[in-house]
Image: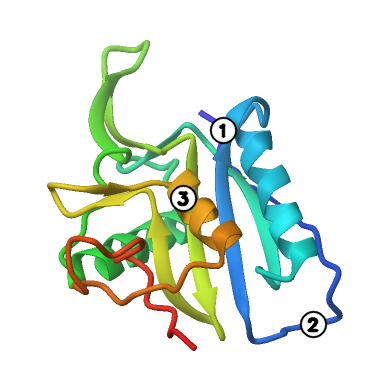
Amino acid sequence: MPNETEQTTDHDSGGDTGGLEVSLWVRRPVCGPRTTVIDRLSALRTAGALDDFSVTAWPEEIALTGDDTQDDLLETIAGFEDWAADRGLSLRPPFETRTTSLLVGDSEDVLRTPMLLAAAYEDGDLVGIYPCTDGTKTWTIPAFLDALEADEKRTPTGAGTDAVLPATERPTS
């Protein structure tokens, strides 16, 4: 199991712009739907609906026990899960904890990462994570990108069942 992440930041800006930025987390290989999302983020940045985005590749599974844990990555994921839980949302699935068997008869607990996860930041503060669910409705990355493309107003968590992106706390203007 690889013990690394790889980040690619595609900037046009010369620094922190303080606007909407998206961190996209992907599993390898970066192809198919993953490249479609990256292309959409690039188009949104070009159109001015998004200030910047970064792409980070993460492993398919992260060891939760043993000597091969990735503490920094696990802390990032725990922060995402805490943010969602504070708003009555869940990131599971697509995160899944399971026990895998090793070749030598032992086993280890691992966290399986989603193919794609988008974390939206406004002025450096986490304001949305996609995909997420409230148990009834699921908010996906494509729905988040659709809303940005349509320049729809974002509404805070708990704004009602018709909210386009209740998991986004970006203020409306």
- In this view, the mark in front (2 or 3): 2
The reply to whether dot 1 and dot 3 touch (C-beta < 8 Å) is no
Badge 2 density bin: few <14, some 14–19, many ≥20, Cα 10 Å: few
Which amino acid type corresponds to the residue marked 2 in the rendered image? Answer: Gly
Q: Is residue 5 visible?
A: no
Sequence-wise first label, 2 or 3: 2
Q: In the depicted view, which residue is nearer to us: 68 or 59? A: 59
Q: Secondary structure at mark 1?
A: loop
- Where residue 124 sits in the image (x, y, percent)? 55, 82
Q: Which mark is residue 70?
A: 3
Between the C-alphas of marks 2 and 1, the distance is 31 Å
Give the quadrant of residue 112: top left
Badge 3 density bin: few <14, some 14–19, many ≥20, Cα 10 Å: some
**Left or right: 117, with 109 as reference point:** right
Badge 1 density bin: few <14, some 14–19, many ≥20, Cα 10 Å: few
Between the C-alphas of marks 1 and 3, the distance is 10 Å
Which amino acid type corresponds to the residue marked 3 in the rendered image? Answer: Gln
Relative to 164, does residue 51 appear above or below in the rendering?
A: below
Q: What residue is disc 1 on?
A: 2
Q: In the depicted view, which residue is nearer to us: 172 or 52? A: 172
Q: What residue is disc 2 on?
A: 15
Residue occupying the point 23% across, 61% down: 162
Residue occupying the point 67% across, 53% down: 41
Sequence-wise first label, 2 or 1: 1
